[in-house]
């Protein structure tokens, strides 16, 4: 596993973004782990987060794109932090763009924040995590309504590796439905591989009991 991925896993734990225990997801599923990107709140956290995203985006999509689109609301700081990091790390000016939940009819009008989209723009979408693909279902038509743009792909921080609406993973369903690549900085398999019975931040994060709970979760909800 690449060094930046190992560092990112520990960063999620350190920032209390990736937590383990008993959680009920929006889908109603009972999960032994939960991710909340809203816990990234400090300048240093957002700086590091942007760099991890930038490295993963560069690895999967290179730099042949123009706009990084972060769906409201969590995608807004993600897109801003990442375009800053992308310029710092790769010397490429990428514009950021996000949507508003409601169309603004005065001043800076329209549904978009940041850069307007132009015909010919190549767009990468950035999100925290995708479980059901619902956000892409909302985002895709917004982007396509702005003009003749090409959606290069989607980047999330964590691939939960569980079924979306059908038998495939949410990321696989997105690729099938919309014809775009969908990738993650790390997968839950990466997380388990790196943390299982291995000390992180002075403690064992995933012990035998938690590993058994994660395995049981994937028996029920994992991708076949």
Image (tube, rainbow, N blue to C red):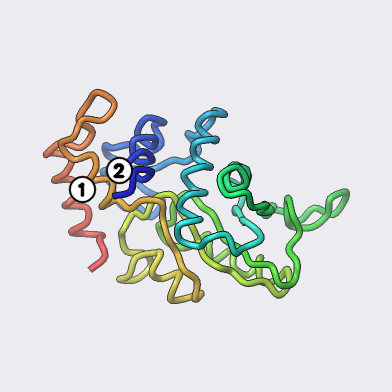
Q: Is residue 104 above or below residue 196?
A: below
> In the visual, does 77 lie left or right of 5?
right
Identify which residue, 84 or 15, lies in the foreground. 84
Mark 1 nearby-residue class (10 Å; few <14, some 14–19, many ≥20): some
> In the visual, does 222 lie left or right of 80?
left
Q: Earlier in the sequence, mark 1 or mark 2?
A: 2
Identify which residue, 214 or 183, lies in the foreground. 183
Q: Is residue 183 above or below residue 7?
A: below
Q: Residue at x 79, y 57 (%)?
A: 110
Q: Position of residue 143 (x, y in %)?
A: 66, 66
Farthest-out residue, right = 107
Q: SS for tag 1?
A: helix
Q: Residue at x 50, y 38 (%)?
A: 38
Task: Assign the C terminus to one quadrant of the image.
Answer: bottom left
User: For residue 130, which quarter of the picture?
Assistant: bottom left
Q: CA distance from mark 1 to mark 2?
A: 8 Å
User: For residue 20, which quarter of the picture?
Assistant: top left
Q: SS for tag 2?
A: strand
Q: Residue at x 53, y 29 (%)?
A: 44
- Residue at numbered disc 2: 33
Residue 214 marker: 1
Q: Residue at x 65, y 58 (%)?
A: 67
Viewer can see residue 18: yes
Q: Position of residue 42 (x, y in %)?
A: 54, 28
Identify which residue, 74 or 153, lies in the foreground. 153
Residue 4 marker: none
Identify which residue, 84 or 205, lies in the foreground. 84
> Is the C-beta separation of discs 1 and 2 under 8 Å?
yes
């Amino acid at each position: 596993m690449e060094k930046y991925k190992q560092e990112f896993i520990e960063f999620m734990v350190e920032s209390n973004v990736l937590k383990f225990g008993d959680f009920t997801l929006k889908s109603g599923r009972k999960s032994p782990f939960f991710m909340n990107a809203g816990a990234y709140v400090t300048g240093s956290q957002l700086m590091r987060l942007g760099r991890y995203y930038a490295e993963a985006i560069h690895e999967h999509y290179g730099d042949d794109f123009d706009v990084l689109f972060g769906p409201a609301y969590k995608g807004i700081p993600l897109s801003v932090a990442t375009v800053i990091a992308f310029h710092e790390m790769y010397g490429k000016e990428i514009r950021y763009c996000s949507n508003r939940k409601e169309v603004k009819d005065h001043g800076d009008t329209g549904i978009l924040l940041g850069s307007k989209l132009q015909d010919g723009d190549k767009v990468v979408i950035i999100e925290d995590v995708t479980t059901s693909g619902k956000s892409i279902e909302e985002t895709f038509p917004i982007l396509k309504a702005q003009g003749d743009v090409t959606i290069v792909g989607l980047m999330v921080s964590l691939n939960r590796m569980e079924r979306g609406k059908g038998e495939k993973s949410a990321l696989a369903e997105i690729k099938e439905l919309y014809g775009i690549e969908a990738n993650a900085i790390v997968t839950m398999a990466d997380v388990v591989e790196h943390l299982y019975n291995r000390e992180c931040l002075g403690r064992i994060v995933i012990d035998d009991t938690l590993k058994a709970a994660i395995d049981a979760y994937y028996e029920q909800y994992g991708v076949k």
